[in-house]
């Protein structure tokens, strides 16, 4: 039987999982580009009348979206650009995503990450060696995973929590690593007025086009450079 204190540690993460499941069931069709198009004028009117509260409310919504792993994070990012422009929209987006990710990370680490990391280390073997490698190269590994939008954002948070990554490098690499993609999507959102006027939908696949993807690959390569230097020097990890 799970001890009460152990259950208390797991409760925040269990709540996140429950909210994520409820979000998939009830919010998947509500948070969409069509919804943003329908309510765009109302949102802009509220922003114009209550800029401070609109800013604080948007950041709170973004934090909640990421922290509870709700669907529609891309739409919220577009909304940041649509409502607040590239700047300060990208600051709101990056700040909200970073805080939300940190909350997930801390909940997952308290809920299962610490125990899982200790268990892997105790059992040893390949998994333990991989864990040590990730811990020793956590800055590079986390930056690579953030620069390249291949793994789901939520999954990266869980991986970091499960291998014993420290909070400080997690927060810093998350903030720095999501800036490029956030800037792209915020810029798309800032131009939504013309897209909506033409009755079209934005091309979100632009991030996988060479002008965007190649710089992201370059940043990932730079992040991997310290690991490559260790390999060339013959350090075992």
Image: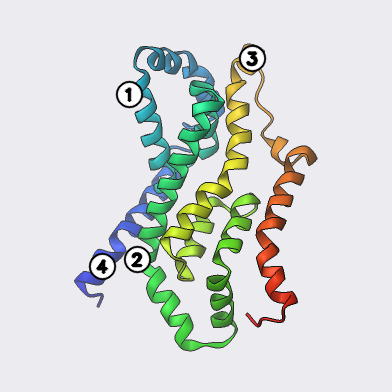
194 in relation to 35, above or below: above
Taking depth in this image into account, of 1 and 96 the one nearest to the observer is 96
As drawn, the label of residue 194 is 3
- For label 4, the crowd category at 10 Å Cα-Cα, with few meaning under 14, some 14 to 19 and many 20 or more, is few
Label 3 vs label 1: CA separation? 26 Å
Mark 4 or 2 closer to N-term?
4
- Which numbered tag is attached to residue 193? none
Contact between labelled residues 2 and 3, with CB atoms less than 8 Å apart: no
Image quarter for residue 14?
Answer: bottom left
- Mark 1 vs mark 2: in front: 1
Q: Nearer the viewer, residue 19 or 133?
A: 133
Q: Which residue is mark 2?
A: 111
Which secondary structure, mark 2?
helix
Indicate which disc, 3 or 1, sits on the residue closer to the N terminus: 1
Q: Locate the C terminus by quadrant.
A: bottom right
Q: Secondary structure at mark 1?
A: helix
Q: State how far apart marks 1 and 2 are (Cα).
A: 33 Å
Q: Say which of marks 3 and 1 sits in front.
A: 1
């Amino acid at each position: 039987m799970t001890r009460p204190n152990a259950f208390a540690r797991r409760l925040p993460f269990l709540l996140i999982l429950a909210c994520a499941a409820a979000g998939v069931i009830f919010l998947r069709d509500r948070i969409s580009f069509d919804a943003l198009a329908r309510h765009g004028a109302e949102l802009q009117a509220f922003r114009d009348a209550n800029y401070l509260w609109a800013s604080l409310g948007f950041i709170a919504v973004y934090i909640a979206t990421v922290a509870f792993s709700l669907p529609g994070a891309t739409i919220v990012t577009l909304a940041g650009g649509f409502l607040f422009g590239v700047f300060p929209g990208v600051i709101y987006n990056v700040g909200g995503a970073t805080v939300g990710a940190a909350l997930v990370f801390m909940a997952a680490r308290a809920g299962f990450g610490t125990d899982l990391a200790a268990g892997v280390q105790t059992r040893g073997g390949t998994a333990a060696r991989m864990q040590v490698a990730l811990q020793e190269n956590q800055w590079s590994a986390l930056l690579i995973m953030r620069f390249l939008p291949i793994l789901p954002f939520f999954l990266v948070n869980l991986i970091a929590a499960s291998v014993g990554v420290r909070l400080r490098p997690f927060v810093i690499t998350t903030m720095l690593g999501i800036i490029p993609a956030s800037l792209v999507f915020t810029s798309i959102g800032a131009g939504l007025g013309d897209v909506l006027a033409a009755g079209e939908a934005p091309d979100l696949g632009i991030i996988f086009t060479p002008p965007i993807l190649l710089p992201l690959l370059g940043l990932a390569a730079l992040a991997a450079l310290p690991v490559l230097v260790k390999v060339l020097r013959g350090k075992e990890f």
